[in-house]
């Protein structure tokens, strides 16, 4: 492990700082005054890392490896089903984008759509946007909803740490996220040919939509993060660590002082798609991604303390739910995320901006 500007960097992944979640929450959990400095230091490292890179490895996050492995096993079983079975619970806007999602089917363009499938859920206790579940498989539902709630709790602790770093109370974000309007996805990137990567991605370059994403990968590799120099660099899987990154709405809240960084999924780095020795087949890949989102009716605009003469307010208010729905609709229509999103890309243009509302922070 190396240290750059006071931030621990994971071995073989110089683009991603390493944060210890247990140190971050140590004082809150122990109430031992001797742990205050430890927690403060880790909070400062988290804030610095998300300002500079936008991505971190999160160790000791308290979500067990057993729980993670159970989800990967469920994913393998689910995606191995015939397409006709998965289509019984196919996603779409009328179903709150919950269920099975195949970019190839929604976009109808296999030459450009991402090479992946997904199964998506929201809060299983929300009757207004019910989830769709495979029949006769209660273990899948129980394990998914338990994992969803565990990620929500980690998300709250990370937001509390970030709030304190800009002079806000630790519970500032709680009213904006407590309804659990999050999005939880298991992903399958099918076995494919090396040739396919000459024109398509497993996940096209994009930024995430919401607050913070918690990502759990298998050992396949292929995730890349765009660095300050504009170059995509590998972010290889790290044992017993989640990857956490900033989404667009949190970056908007912090007036771009926290970085929502572009990332993508390509073939593993051991395969060179520009060469002549690309193997015939690239093995399948699986991941589990929990996307933190504000309440759908939360109005998001830059926090006052993040707006300064050197960094004036950059955004008008926008409703979180509207923003997320427009992003998901765009994803389904095109079979891949837009590389860069602006409010004017919504289906009703910039009408999603709430220009007349002024909310102090």
Image (tube, rainbow, N blue to C red):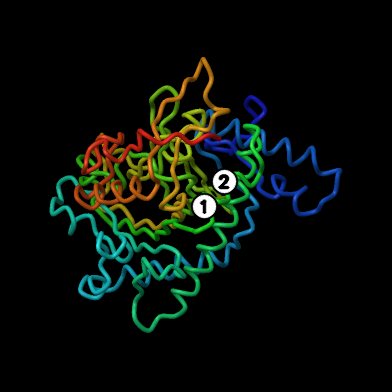
Residue depicted at x 23% and y 37%: 349
Closest to the observer: 30 or 358? 358
Residue depicted at x 26% and y 43%: 278
Tell me residue 99's x, y (percent): 32, 66
Image mark for residue 177 = 1
In the image: residue 184, left or right of residue 63: left
Q: Quadrant of residue 159?
A: top right
Mark 1 vs 2: CB contact within 8 A = yes
Label 1: few (<14), some (14–19) or many (≥20) C-alpha neighbours in 10 Å: many
Image mark for residue 248 = none
Considering every residue shown, the one lying at the far top of the view is: 310
Label 2: few (<14), some (14–19) or many (≥20) C-alpha neighbours in 10 Å: some
Tell me residue 307's x, y (percent): 52, 24
Q: Helix or strand or loop: what does disc 2 sit on? A: loop
> Does residue 76 appear anywhere in the picture?
yes
The vertical placement of 119 against 177, above or below, is below
Residue annotated with mark 2: 173
Quadrant that contains the C terminus: top right
Closest to the observer: 48 or 11? 48
Quadrant that contains the N terminus: top right
Per the model, the C-alpha gap separating discs 1 and 2 is 6 Å
Closest to the observer: 1 or 120? 120
Considering every residue shown, the one lying at the far bottom of the view is: 136
Closest to the observer: 84 or 170? 170
Tell me residue 237's x, y (percent): 49, 48
Instruction: Please give the count of numbered marks on the rendered protein.
Output: 2
Residue depicted at x 47% and y 48%: 213
> Does residue 222 appear anywhere in the picture?
no
Q: Helix or strand or loop: what does disc 1 sit on? A: helix
Tell me residue 261's x, y (percent): 43, 34
In the image: residue 294, left or right of residue 281: right
In the image: residue 165, left or right of residue 357: right
């Amino acid at each position: 492990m190396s240290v750059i500007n006071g931030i621990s960097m994971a071995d073989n992944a110089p683009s991603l700082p390493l944060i210890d979640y247990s140190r971050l929450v140590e004082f809150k959990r122990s109430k031992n005054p001797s742990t205050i400095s430890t927690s403060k230091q880790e909070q400062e490292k988290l804030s610095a890392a998300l300002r500079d890179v936008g991505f971190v490895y999160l160790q000791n996050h308290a979500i067990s490896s057993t729980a993670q492995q159970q989800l990967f096993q469920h994913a393998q079983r689910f995606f191995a089903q015939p397409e006709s079975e998965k289509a019984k619970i196919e996603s779409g806007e009328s179903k709150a984008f919950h269920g099975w999602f195949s970019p190839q089917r929604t976009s109808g363009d296999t030459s450009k759509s991402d090479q992946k499938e997904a199964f998506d859920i929201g809060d299983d206790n929300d009757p207004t946007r019910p989830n769709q579940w495979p029949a006769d498989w209660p273990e899948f539902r129980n394990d998914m909803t338990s994992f969803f709630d565990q990620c929500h709790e980690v998300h709250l602790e990370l937001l509390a740490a970030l709030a304190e770093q800009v002079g806000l109370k630790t519970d500032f974000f709680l009213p904006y996220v407590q309804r659990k309007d999050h999005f939880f996805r298991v992903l399958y990137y099918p076995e494919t040919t090396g040739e396919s990567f000459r024109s398509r991605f497993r996940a096209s370059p994009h930024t995430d939509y919401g607050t913070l994403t918690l990502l759990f990968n298998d050992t396949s590799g292929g995730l890349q993060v765009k660095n300050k120099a504009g170059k995509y660099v590998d972010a290889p899987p790290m044992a017993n660590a989640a990857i956490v990154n900033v989404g667009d709405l949190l970056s908007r809240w912090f007036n771009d002082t926290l970085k929502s960084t572009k990332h993508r999924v390509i073939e593993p780095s051991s395969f060179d798609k520009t060469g002549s020795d690309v193997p015939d087949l690239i093995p399948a890949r699986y991941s589990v991604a929990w996307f933190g989102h504000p309440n759908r009716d939360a109005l998001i605009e830059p926090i006052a303390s993040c707006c300064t003469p050197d960094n004036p307010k950059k955004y008008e208010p926008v409703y979180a739910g509207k923003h997320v729905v427009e992003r998901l609709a765009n994803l389904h229509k095109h079979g891949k995320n837009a590389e860069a999103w602006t409010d004017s890309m919504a289906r009703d243009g910039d009408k999603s901006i709430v220009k007349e509302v002024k909310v102090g922070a």
